[in-house]
Image (cartoon, rainbow, N blue to C red):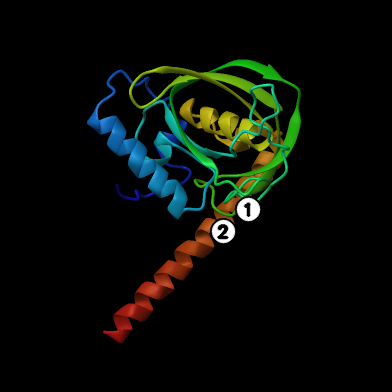
Amino acid sequence: MASRPIVEFPHPVLKQRCQEVARFDGALWSLLDDMKETMADADGLGLAANQVAVSWRVFTMLVPVPHANGDGRDNDSGKDNDKDQDKDGAPPEVLELVNPVVVGKRGEIRFEEGCLSFPGVHEQVLRAAEVDVTFQDRHGAAQRRSFGGVAAVCVQHELDHLDGVTFLERLSPLKRRLALRSYQRAQLSRQLEAEDDRRAAARAR
């Protein structure tokens, strides 16, 4: 298990629709293990395979342990709670979704989203408040889960990635332009800082 580099916009892999997984073997298991470690190292809530430059329909995510509410759904309020534990103090579940498909949506929620491929950018995005999802686990077994609140937002965000869609494309044209300008300025600033660090390290030799 190893952490992989996260690609950042405008890397072309982020604009490609990912391919369905047909082989449930060691290559997939290694990818899933690495994605979970990468997500943890980056302090993320979700990670799509193309964010680590693998164009497969796979993502990992953190979800709160479901409460006993009797309806079979993950009981998530939609508030930005500490992802290290749920309301009962239990650690969140790390879920692997292979070939996921949304088969039902209900309600609306507006939530401030960020993205590991857009460091420093956060924008309000309108999503479905609850989603039903079918998928396969790492061994190919069929699964079905329902998610609400933050977990539903995360599912939709990561599924967009697998379709080659970034969360900024869910914004109005004006907000998208402003967000991209802000991101590009931040990128340039990081590049200049990295160059300064390289020059300082070279002088110190």
Q: Residue at x 34, y 21 (%)?
A: 21
Residue 46 position within the rendered picture, expressed as x and y whole percent measured from the top left: 51, 40
Residue 188 can be seen, yes or no? yes
Q: Residue at x 49, y 25 (%)?
A: 163
Q: Amino acid at mark 2?
A: Ala
Q: Residue at x 37, y 27 (%)?
A: 56
Q: Quadrant of residue 74?
A: top right
Residue 14 position within the rendered picture, expressed as x and y whole percent measured from the top left: 45, 35
Instruction: State the SS at label 1.
Output: helix
Q: Residue furthest bottom?
A: 204
Q: Quadrant of residue 125?
A: top right
Residue 152 position within the rendered picture, expressed as x and y whole percent measured from the top left: 63, 30
Residue 53 can be seen, yes or no? no
Instruction: State the SS at label 2.
Output: helix
Foreground residue among 2 and 5? 2
Foreground residue among 48 and 196? 48
Question: What crowding class fits label 1: few (fewer than 14 Cα within 10 Å), some (14-19), or many (20 or more)?
Answer: few
The residue that label 2 is drawn on is 186
Question: What crowding class fits label 2: few (fewer than 14 Cα within 10 Å), some (14-19), or many (20 or more)?
Answer: some
- Number of dots carrying numbers: 2
CA–CA distance between discs 2 and 1? 6 Å
The residue that label 1 is drawn on is 182
Q: Amino acid at mark 1?
A: Ser
Horizontal placement of 4 versus 81: left or right? left
Determine contact: label 2, label 1, CB under 8 Å: yes
Residue 17 position within the rendered picture, expressed as x and y whole percent measured from the top left: 43, 24
Foreground residue among 50 and 22? 22
Foreground residue among 135 and 55? 135
Horizontal placement of 48 versus 203: left or right? right
